Image (tube, rainbow, N blue to C red):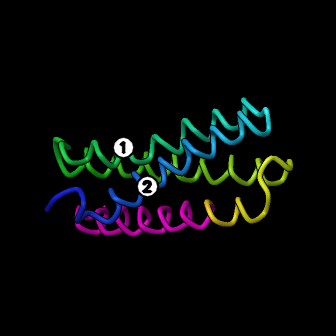
Amino acid sequence: MTDRDNVIHVKTYAFAIRVVNAYRFLCNSQQEYVLSKQMLRSGTAIGALVAEVHHAQSSADFLNKMNIALKEANETSYWLSLLKDTGYLEIEQYDSIAKDCNEIIALLVSIVKSMKNNLGR
C-alpha cells in the first residue's frame, strides 16, 4: 500500500496544507500570531505522527503514535474554535476547516479503537 492509498495519510497531509494556508492568512490578513501558531503546530503534527506510524517498531508504538495524533487533532479543533469565537475566522472559513478536522478525528478514533481491540486492551 502506498501513502496515496492510505486515507488517513492523504487526509492529514491535505489538512496540514490547509492549516499552513490558514496560518498564513491569519498572520497576513488578521495580524494574529499567537493562537494561529498553536493551530499551526498541532494541525501539522497530526500528519507528521501519521507518517511516523509507517515505521512503528511495534503495534504498541503504532497505537501510541495514533493516540498522540488524535490528541493533536483534538487540540487543533480547540484552536480553530477559539479563532472562530474571537472573530479571527469567519464562520464559513471555520466550518470548512473544522469539517476536515472532525473527519480526521473520527478516522483516528476508529483506528485507535480498532487497534485497541486487536491488542486486547
Number of the front mark, 2 or 1: 2
Classify mark 1: helix, strand or loop: helix
Classify mark 2: helix, strand or loop: helix
Out of 84 and 92, give the one closest to the viewer: 92
Q: Residue at x 70, y 60 (%)?
A: 93
Out of 44 and 72, give the one closest to the viewer: 44
At label 2, counting other C-alpha atoms closer than 10 Å, the crowd grade (few under 14, some 14-19, many 20 or more) is some
Going from the N terminus, do you reach mark 2 or mark 1 first?
2
Kind of residue at disc 1: Leu
- Residue 61: horizontal and vertical position, in percent? 25, 44
Instruction: Give the residue at mark 1.
Output: 49
- Residue 76: horizontal and vertical position, in percent? 60, 48
Asked if the residue at tag 1 contacts the one at tag 2, i.e. Cβ–Cβ closer than 8 Å, the answer is: no
Name the side, left or right, on which 42 lies relative to 2. right
Seen in the picture, residue 81 relative to 64 is either above or below; the reply is below
Kind of residue at disc 2: Ala
Instruction: Give the residue at mark 2.
Output: 14
At label 1, counting other C-alpha atoms closer than 10 Å, the crowd grade (few under 14, some 14-19, many 20 or more) is many
- Residue 87: horizontal and vertical position, in percent? 86, 50
Task: Look at the image and say whether residue 88 sits in the magenta stretch.
Answer: no
Out of 64 and 48, give the one closest to the viewer: 48
Q: Residue at x 78, y 63 (%)?
A: 91
Q: Locate the N terminus and report the quarter of the image it occupies.
A: bottom left
Q: Which residues are magenta?
A: 98-121
